[in-house]
Amino acid sequence: MTHTREISSVQQQLDFPRARYMVPRGPSLLERLGFRKPDREAHLARHYTQEDLEARGWDEELIAVVLGEPDSWDYPDGTPESSTQLYLISRAAKSERRDPRVMTRVHAVMLRDHREHIAALQQREAATAQILDGELEVEEMHRDELEQHAWGHFLDEWDERVGTEEPRASEAALMLASVHWLRFACTPYPAATQEIGEPLDEAARRRLNNICLKAIAASYPHLQDTVKAMLRG
């Protein structure tokens, strides 16, 4: 036993962190001369990627003709295979203001995005009104069909987010999955709570959620206890 303890003591000494005995490293020569390591996030914030430009209305030909060679490159994985072309935002913005070919494309995308934004706002307002007016009706279906839809959707979400062994389909789990599926597939709740512009107030979200849950409980008596537990939580 004594021999074993001695070996252990020696091993601990050998494994003792070397940093304690090392002389603190001072600034490098480049650092003393005033050079600093570039801030990657700040650098990226000053540039568009090709995907960014295409989302604004540019296409590959327009990028090549108007902007030409990229202003910089990014290597997310530190390898040539992961290289990303970067174009200065200031240079692209100048072309978007002055070059008719670019202006036409960018303005068309801005107009489309604006119309989609207005349509989404109107959809959210209509869905909210439908919930608050007290005329919410939840589609009724046979329990077996409901649980099949709900559990299949739950397993799809589980695979994407967790990726571990699938959970067991207990009665409690099936009822909870059924309530969640009904709320998102058979009520206006998703449309009423979608994030558009300013985030939805949490109190308003909770109110909409509670109304939808009560409507589900009214249409599906076997889910009433599950809904009550969710309302309490």
Image (cartoon, helix red, strand yellow):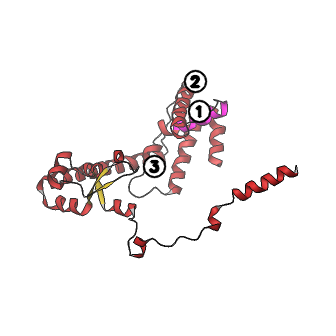
Between disc 1 and disc 3, whose residue precedes? 3
Between disc 1 and disc 2, whose residue precedes? 2
Q: Quadrant of residue 45?
A: bottom left
Badge 1, how many Cα within 10 Å: few under 14, some, many 20+? some
Between disc 2 and disc 3, whose residue precedes? 2
Q: Amino acid at mark 3?
A: Thr
Residue 45 located within the stretch drawn in magenta: no
Badge 2, how many Cα within 10 Å: few under 14, some, many 20+? few
3D distance between C-alphas at marks 1 and 3: 23 Å
Badge number at residue 193: 3
Q: Nearer the viewer, residue 163 or 74?
A: 74
Residue holding disc 2: 144
Q: Residue at x 73, y 59 (%)?
A: 13
User: Can residue 66 be seen at all in this image of the molecule?
Assistant: yes
Q: Residue furthest right?
A: 1
On screen, 31 above or below 109? below
Residue 119 left/right relative to 225:
left
Percent x, y of residue 115: 27, 50
On screen, 101 above or below 45? above
Q: Which element carries disc 2, helix, strand or loop?
A: helix
Q: Residue at x 40, y 48 (%)?
A: 124
| Span shown in magenta | 169-182
Labels 1 & 3 near each other (Cβ < 8 A): no
Q: Quadrant of residue 67?
A: bottom left
Labels 2 & 3 near each other (Cβ < 8 A): no
Badge number at residue 65: none
Q: Nearer the viewer, mark 1 or mark 2?
A: 2
Percent x, y of residue 88: 26, 60
Residue holding disc 1: 220
